[in-house]
Amino acid sequence: MAKNKVCTRCKTPITCLPETIEHCDCTQVQLHPDAKAFLRSSFHKCLCNTCLEHMNQLIVDARTEDFPRKRSEMVEGKHYYLENGYFVFTELYHLLKGQCCQNGCRHCVYGFKNRYL
């Protein structure tokens, strides 16, 4: 039986088919093994195909990046952007950090910010 859910990342309505997962839309997205492992360990439950593709690309891109340990290693637009004089860290930065701080960050790649909404 189909279940109506929302994507835990973008809140788009999706239809989930857990009893017949092979017929679910999400099986159409080819995920890198690292992306599959990451998604299993995150707070995300069901994601829409657009978010699955985005997360997959983010994980693949991050494989060639190192976490910027010093401010001088951070690249504006890639690791952060400025908003009203404040640093806002990107999904890539959070992913490279390697763990969720559970502070509900705006661009939390781990899905924690959506956990209680």
Image (cartoon, rainbow, N blue to C red):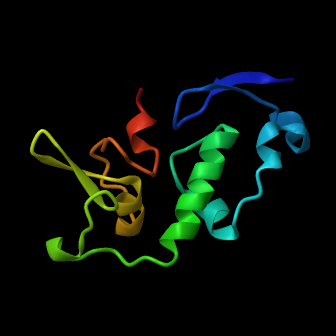
Q: Is residue 106 left or right of residue 44?
A: left
Q: Is residue 9 left or right of residue 2?
A: left
In the picture as drawn, the residue positioned furthest to the left comes out as 85
Q: Residue at horizontal 25%, vertical 60%?
A: 76
Q: Where residue 20 sits: x, y (%)? A: 90, 37
Q: Residue at horizontal 38%, vertical 48%?
A: 108
The total of numbered circles placed on residues is 0
Q: Is residue 11 left or right of residue 48?
A: left
Between 82 and 98, which is closer to the camera in this rendering? 82
**Looking at the image, residue 23 lies above or below residue 31:** above
Quarter of the image with the C terminus is top left
**Looking at the image, residue 77 lies above or below residue 48:** below
Between 45 and 90, which is closer to the camera in this rendering? 90
Q: Residue at horizontal 36%, vertical 56%?
A: 100
Q: Where residue 91 sits: x, y (%)? A: 40, 54
**Looking at the image, residue 9 lies above or below residue 72:** above
Quarter of the image with the N terminus is top right
**Looking at the image, residue 69 lies above or below residue 61:** below
Instruction: Name which quarter of the figure residue 6 lies in.
Output: top right
Q: Is residue 6 left or right of residue 10?
A: right
Q: Where residue 111 sits: x, y (%)? A: 46, 44
Q: Where residue 59 sits: x, y (%)? A: 55, 64
Q: Residue at horizontal 42%, vertical 62%?
A: 95
